[in-house]
Amino acid sequence: SLDWLRSGMDASSAWICVFLVGLACGVCASVLDIGTAWLIDLRDGVCSKGFWFNREQCCWGSNQTTFDGQYECPQWMTWSVILGHLPNDAGAYVIQYLMFVVWAVIFSWMAATLVRVFAPYASGSGIPEIKTILSGFIIRGYLGKWTLLIKIISLIFIVSSGVNVGKEGPMIHIAACCGNFFAYLFPKYGNNEAKKREIHSAAAAAGISVAFGAPIAGVLFSLEEISYYFPLKTLYRSFFCALVAAFVVRSINPFGNDHLTMFFVEVRSPWFFLELIPFIFLGVFGGVIGVVFIRLNAWFCKLRKTTRLGQYPIMEVVAMGFVTALISYPNPYTREDNSSLIARLFHDCGPADNSALCDYNRTYTSVTAAFAKAEPGPGVKQAMWQLFLAVIVKFVLSIMSVGMKIPAGVFIPNMVVGAMVGRMVGVGMEQLSTTYSEAALFVTACGTTARCVTPGLYAVIGAAAVMGGVTRITISMVVIMVEVTGGLQYIVPLMAAVMTSKWVGDILMKEGIYELLINMNGYPFLDNKLDFHHTTVAADVMRPRPTEKDPLWALPQDSMTVEELEHVVHSGPNGFPIVVSRENQYLVGFVLRKELQVALEASRHPNSGIVSSSRVYFVEHCTTNDYIGPKPLVLSSMVDYAPITIIDQTPMETVIDLFRKMGLRQTLVTHKGRLLGIITKKDVLKHIKEMDHVDSGSVGFN
Amino acid sequence: SLDWLRSGMDASSAWICVFLVGLACGVCASVLDIGTAWLIDLRDGVCSKGFWFNREQCCWGSNQTTFDGQYECPQWMTWSVILGHLPNDAGAYVIQYLMFVVWAVIFSWMAATLVRVFAPYASGSGIPEIKTILSGFIIRGYLGKWTLLIKIISLIFIVSSGVNVGKEGPMIHIAACCGNFFAYLFPKYGNNEAKKREIHSAAAAAGISVAFGAPIAGVLFSLEEISYYFPLKTLYRSFFCALVAAFVVRSINPFGNDHLTMFFVEVRSPWFFLELIPFIFLGVFGGVIGVVFIRLNAWFCKLRKTTRLGQYPIMEVVAMGFVTALISYPNPYTREDNSSLIARLFHDCGPADNSALCDYNRTYTSVTAAFAKAEPGPGVKQAMWQLFLAVIVKFVLSIMSVGMKIPAGVFIPNMVVGAMVGRMVGVGMEQLSTTYSEAALFVTACGTTARCVTPGLYAVIGAAAVMGGVTRITISMVVIMVEVTGGLQYIVPLMAAVMTSKWVGDILMKEGIYELLINMNGYPFLDNKLDFHHTTVAADVMRPRPTEKDPLWALPQDSMTVEELEHVVHSGPNGFPIVVSRENQYLVGFVLRKELQVALEASRHPNSGIVSSSRVYFVEHCTTNDYIGPKPLVLSSMVDYAPITIIDQTPMETVIDLFRKMGLRQTLVTHKGRLLGIITKKDVLKHIKEMDHVDSGSVGFN
């Protein structure tokens, strides 16, 4: 019964931990959303009721509020109004433009400085690093409290500055930092790296859950992209964690509506079968543009490393903030922040909608035909031009922005590009269906009365396709889009586009952006998505090679002196197999160099009685009374007597499988019981690269 | 480049295969749906336009059609009308009742006979068996074409007969059969059991996808419950397969509406925070009722095995069909087929709804207050009584029906019980909120105008909770309910209820229904959900035990005669380790008994030159010219020279992990290179049961 209680406590500690992590993620995300919303509005003006109100909050209480894409009320004072200009004169435009640029420079400087001075680890999205950490590698301080704090603050600044980066990817890093923090409150998790990774997997789910308001997609993203090993236990906890986080965000309600969804799309028009053709076209486009993005971004990152550009990280960010603001202000689609723009593009034109995108000359002859004939007005034509320019600007800016020394995600910048292209394709299709509304094709598909092409849906599909092309995620991408739009009936078109984009992307370039970044940084990541098809065996990979005459660094179990051991430990590898004797190389166990160093240092204490000629025992040793000679050093407690071993003829496919599934760092190779060599994770990674004819020198870690 | 082409062909063969499997699943599900709909209506009457029309199709073309819960039109002739009675007199009731019972008996007899005579494997849901197959065990013929055909036909009959079993679980078996069929078209999959399992995992996803019209839930169900090993490759293919299947069903459109969802719920009322209390109560109820169901069902199955009941499987089914029909007809909620009943319970009362469940005396004082005050009319009170009786009847019948020798799932019967209880709780809550509508609690939660309790939502939650209690699935359960109702905003309440029901269920009884059935049938299934916490090591489990004096069945590599080998093969275990020599037990390889038998039989051919005293070589052997003696038997080609080995001090936790993750059937235990013993999967299973103090004799397989 005590056993039952203990196991109950044990199990619930995990639940409590992920509950706290979820709570913290929810709070972080809300702080991020509220802070960003406030700073973005600060670029436009301030609230006369109090500078801490953002535009929407400022106008909530007012009865003079009007809504036209954004809230307008007298309490909200733009900078030009404060400086005494009328809202619409030329001077006001100049002042607003100027303030827009000035704030952008200030914000981007703040973000870059914070990262540079306090937490260099806060830069980037953090996803490649977290993938590597979850595969078993330790990067000290990467998930620290300091990184967490700085990442949140600088993320608020950089997103508000308008620099074309996303805040969704970094949320995963923020969530993982929260996970790390709470794991230390529970000794079971804090003291065990493998168990801590379970918490990180759950935290990653919570990160995506709050980033997109999509708990199910969060779990799937953690499973598909982030986590290395995802047992069912982790699945349940991830789900719980994601849910708590989503619930916290919903309760704090930073999006200001009752839906848990970021880009809730009200209209639910059905789609017809033939639309799959443009959807698949968008998928192909997404795959191609994704690869172009990855390649150009990688080229730019290399440029940054090799030229003088990389020596001025703060200057670079500030310059980017300046240029971005300067280019973005004139075009309404580049001026608007990415999230609002996506929401606008996803949204369908209602009858009351009078934005440029919805400026149709509708023939209101009857209620049912209201939407049937929609001649585009000048607003739509202008919007198409502006969107086209905005696509180019945003795409180029995102290629240059992602990779700077600031927190930066690739999700939203690519989503925006996809959504704009999708919307344009959608408007094109809509015009096609209106112009040829009598064509047999459209008559069978739409009937004559109903409107049948929804440009907003094309924007959704386009966004998913480009994101899919860049990241190569599939099922979680579809679920993210379903959850953010609430459109369950769009699963099939989304799936068709995302699968196409993945296939096209995979053909053009094997790696997604995260794998590329992992490779570029030389992280020791053993990709569990790639198949290994070669016929090599363990004997071809182990060190020393059978043909080489290199020595095998094996320690005899009871015939070494302390002096000899010190010499070996000083110059040898990170771990040593223990064998029966030099002549009889039968495996006894495995010991880490790190632990030997600690033990040797302790033995050097004058009172220990250990001298240079003391014998070292790696097995249990009983000192009998008639024992002559100095006191022996017994190190049996630090030997792993059950290392995983393989036989030299084991195919490398199986060996790689073992490394992946059992999370090994090394394995010992035997032949008829005799120890032949050792294979480390580094050897495996090098071998895979060699087999793929890639330069294997880039695998660099200790 | 040829390599690229080959790998491309190789990869696409998998996609083509799962595409075909998805197609086949979609067709099977449509046949099942159409057949069931037709036979269910046949119990009521026939269509005068043609006997092959079901009620809905019969009334489609008619302009006299009315819809009141079901379609009514003059073309549809009930049996009483055919026999000359007016629709509503007492004689008509008797005739309809009689026909209802007669058809039930005929259908259940058909179903039971088909299974008994043609395909005994078609009985049950098949989920425990498929779980076992996916864990690496082979049950010949279980996924055969014959099983497939009979399962579909008898499933149509048994569901139409009204016997309280579901058709969703068996769809997974049907899908797996489709998977097996198409796997044989691709040699890569047909000839490799491990690869075939990848197809089965994808097929299982398609099965749930078509059973519930829920592709994402299908993939998650395959991941959470069915599959043993689910790499990302399988995830992508499962998703594709599930999607193709769902698309086929949508195109054939057996549900007759444009939504992909079975129980599409139109009304989308928000829920308020305090409602979580009744939701969690439903979760507790679901957990308890789930365990009660499992225990009683297991007790009944044992009764069937040990008493004479089991000797008359056909009689039992027919009797059950008779009794079910007899009891079910008078109560409208038991008379209705389960799917329609669930749809009715999930559905909210609209203003135009005049069924008994929606018989409220509403005060239509204003539009907004229309729903605020809803006194229940006599219809609601009557409906509550009938529902209460229906819960008891359906629950008892499902306990007795599941486990008979017919295709039978547990999903829908339990869903129906949960939905009925949930609806009752929902109506109770609704009354509470109307009666005390001025109470501070409800005023803050609902305001005064809006209606705030939705009984239909409670039915959804109740259904999920009971299903969760029985099967212990969580995330896929939530996603199933979200996809079947289209209610994305109900994720949080669903999750709260399902998690509660799983926790309560797990406390009361460790196993879900599938694990229990696996244990009861003694399948060799190494559960990957359970943790192993004991401190035993490999040496405690291997055979022979170190303390025992049993011999280790190891074969020397080059010092045995054919006669000796024949003797050993005749009486030994299923596999033999090969060692250097009897004195020097260093491991060389591993050979299966089955293969040795084949080789020995071949060697007995008179022309082979092999005699009883021939030496047997398990290693490469060169016959030199000066070799004296009979021709040796060289068996090196059948030896696995790279078996997985472990060291005797390896903790059993690691060993179990190895068995699960690497899909091992046995592993060899060594100590300092010397072979000590062998651990088979059976030994591991027995050891786990011994440690859990369960009778280990029930693990029975060859």
Image (cartoon, coloured by chain):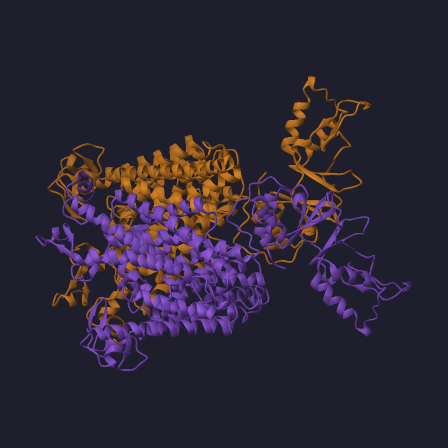
Chain colours: A orange, B purple
Query: Of residues A236 and A429, which is closer to you in this image?
Result: A236
Q: Is residue B190 visible?
A: yes
Given residues A561 and B532, the one toward you in this image is B532
Q: As drawn, is B617 to the left or to the right of A273? A: right
Q: Is residue A619 above or below residue B257?
A: above
Q: Looking at the picture, how far across and down is residue A80, in whole percent?
A: 17, 38
Q: Is residue B121 left or right of residue B650?
A: left
Q: From this viewpoint, is residue B77 visible?
A: no
Q: Is residue B568 above or below residue B490?
A: below
Q: Quadrant of residue B404?
A: bottom left
Q: Residue at x 50, y 61 (%)?
A: B307
Q: Position of residue A411 (x, y in %)?
A: 38, 49
The answer to whether B531 appears left or right of B475 in the picture is right
| Residue A593 picture location, percent across and down | 65, 33
For the C terminus of chain B, the quadrant is bottom right
Image quadrant of residue B341?
A: bottom left
**As displayed, is residue A440 above or below residue A593?**
below
Where is residue B77? Give x, y as percent: 25, 78
Question: Outermost residue toward the top?
Answer: A607
The residue nearer to you, when weighing A494 against A337, is A494
Q: Residue furthest left?
A: B365
Position of the N terminus of chain B by quadrant: bottom right
